[in-house]
Amino acid sequence: MIECLKRIIRKYQSLEPPDGLLPRRVAIGSLPGKVSVVTGVRGSGKTTLLRQRIRQLIESGVPRKNILYLNLTDDRLYWLRHENPDIILEAYYELHPQKRGSETVHYFFDEVQALQHWPLFIDRLLRTEKCEITVAGSLLPSPEEETACPLTGRIVSWEIFPLSFREFLYGKGIESDGPLSTKQRLTIQKAFEDYWQFGGFPGANRVDQQQSIEAHQANWNAILASIIGHHNISHPRAVIDLAHWLMDNTGFFYAVSHLTDHLKSLGHRVRKSSVVDWLVAFEDAGLLFSVNIFSSSPTRISVNPRKVYCVDHALTASVSSGIFTNRDCLLENLVFTALRRVTPEIFYHKTKTGREVDLVALLPSAPGQEQAILLIQVCASLADPRVKQSELHSLSEAMVELAVAEGTIVTWRTDETIPVGFGTIRVVPIWQFLLEMEPRT
């Protein structure tokens, strides 16, 4: 077994970090005494990010022999799930005994959740070895679980999502930073049509439409299989049926009791508590996200339904039945994912008269400053005057209630500014909103 590990370690050390990968505009680094943890949905580009970091280290002069990379879902390493992970150190230091304690070794463990009790192993590495550690995984512990983890307080996290629109443009060589000329704007608008169709999963890009749909469906099945296997779920068919219902209802409301009744109508004998656990598992895997009503009252939050969104609008289009999903739903999902890259604090709002504002986001703020509140309505077209008036009325009512001076309506193409009694409502096309939400680098 140790010889198998040594062969794999040697192979990875001799490989050139591949070119041609869709680049990520996320830079991961390291801090002394901390472990860098990269999380995100399966297929979102975590491995690419690790490879980019390895290339940076090599280009900065770090010897290849000082880098240990293992993908722990490699089938040749399946036996490691039942072994003491110390064998990894044994294998590496048999290859390079002179480095122990004298040189910094950079450890990269991809899909680290395949290793039993991996936090204990990483904790011991941090305490006993001269090293920097980066781990990546699709099913790593949630923040609640991490409170009992030996690494608590020593984790620097990066949450990775499928390609953002700006990253998508960057991969196509399209400049999107700085003031845009008319030609650039037209080029970006044209590129958005591709992004709308193919989405952000790297494996579903650079192929034709049918191959993209097949890639999304294959990734969807792999994500669900990994969730079911990781949590040892005894009702896999019920989990799959639940996931499909949620995808079919992207952007809509749900209640746990309704979901439970729906599964029972399909012949599944399930408890509400199981449905709650599965919803948490979907969110921990980075696949589906639930949004509460915006309120400081726990009671109001508990009695109101939640809204559901998927990590990628094109994945939704490729997997859902299309009965309920339409352009407005997918557009709202895309706006949600743009916000989710910036903040996890996203809600919906009901005004005192019962009008709904699609999304409320609390943006990160500097210490001592209040969080900025974004109020956002999503509507593909405002061509119908009645629709436009309704959207403006809902948003302006919420602006007054929450004392927010600016609201936003995200549309397919419209770009205008509308003064209202309490402030201003910006109407922006979706491509512009996506670029505004992502910081330039």
Image (cartoon, rainbow, N blue to C red):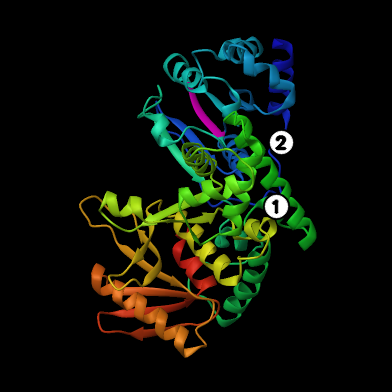
Q: Quadrant of residue 30?
A: top left
Q: For the point 56% across and 26% down, which residue is it? A: 107
Residue 435 drawn at (x, y percent):
50, 66
Please state the extent of the stretch shown in magenta in the rendering.
131-136
Q: For the point 37% across and 27% down, which residue is it? A: 152
Q: Residue at the left extreme?
A: 368
Amino acid of disc 1? His
Residue 285 drawn at (x, y percent):
55, 41
- Is any atom of residue 44 visible in this view? no
Q: Which residue is mark 2?
A: 16
In the rendered view, tell whether residue 68 sits above or below residue 219.
above
The total number of labels drawn is 2
In the rendered view, tell whether residue 4 sits above or below residue 404.
above
Q: Nearer the viewer, mark 1 or mark 2?
A: 1
Q: CA distance from mark 1 to mark 2?
A: 28 Å
Q: For the point 58% across and 11% down, which residue is it? A: 84
Amino acid of disc 2? Glu
As drawn, is 57 to the left or to the right of 405?
right
Look at the image and say whether residue 133 sits in the magenta stretch: yes
Mark 2 packing: few (<14 Cα in 10 Å), some, or many (20+)?
A: few
Q: Which residue is mark 1?
A: 216
Q: Are marks 1 and 2 in contact (CB under 8 Å)?
A: no
